[in-house]
Amino acid sequence: GLGKMSAKISSKWFLSFPLSIVAIVAVMFASLWFRPSGLLMSTTGRTTTTDGKYIRSIAELQAYMEKPVVSANVPPAPAGFDFNAAKALFDTKCNVCHTQGSTMDAFKSKYKKTGKVDVIVKRMQATPGSGITVEQAADIMIYMNEKL
């Protein structure tokens, strides 16, 4: 029974157990600090821009997010384009399923920064009940591409 089993356990188990825990934690920390390249605390960031640069600080991230990007898949606004009417259309059609505030962060980081304004507008247009026509979608794309 237990008597024979406990007799085989070393009397120094109370030292080996905590020491092995400390060793495991030390290996975990070392693996987080050292990179495969062998450098300690590499200068690469966790956020990579579309041009391959790394963002290392909040100031760099804010500057990157404020830098305007125009989607290549959306035509530029023609001369005399009515941005006020396009904004009213945007406000009307794009508040049916969600509020603009609830999606603006995802829009700016996931679609606007990657030049995919057309993708999100076409997705909204394909949603049942959106009522967005092809002409309205084009106006919304131009507005979102140049004014948001």
Image: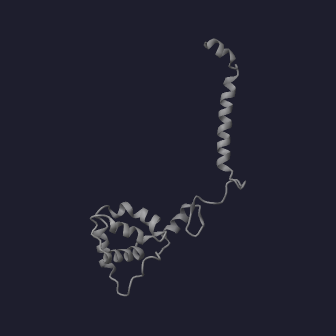
Dividing the picture into quarters, in which one does residue 133 lie?
bottom left
Write the residue at 28% across / 66% down. 130
Assign the N terminus to one quadrant of the image.
top right
Residue 14 lies, in percent from the top left, at: 66, 24
Q: Residue furthest bottom?
A: 79
Vertical relation: 132 (above or below) 1: below
Residue 81 lies, in percent from the top left, at: 35, 84
Vertical relation: 136 (above or below) 101: below
Q: Residue furthest right?
A: 38
Dividing the picture into quarters, in which one does residue 139 lie?
bottom left
**Residue 71 visible within the image:** yes
Asked if residue 12 lies left or right of residue 143, the reply is: right
Q: Nearer the viewer, residue 9 or 82?
A: 9
Count the labels in the image. Answer: 0
**Residue 86 visible within the image:** no
Vertical relation: 77 (above or below) 1: below
Residue 105 lies, in percent from the top left, at: 42, 62
Write the residue at 39% across / 64% down. 104
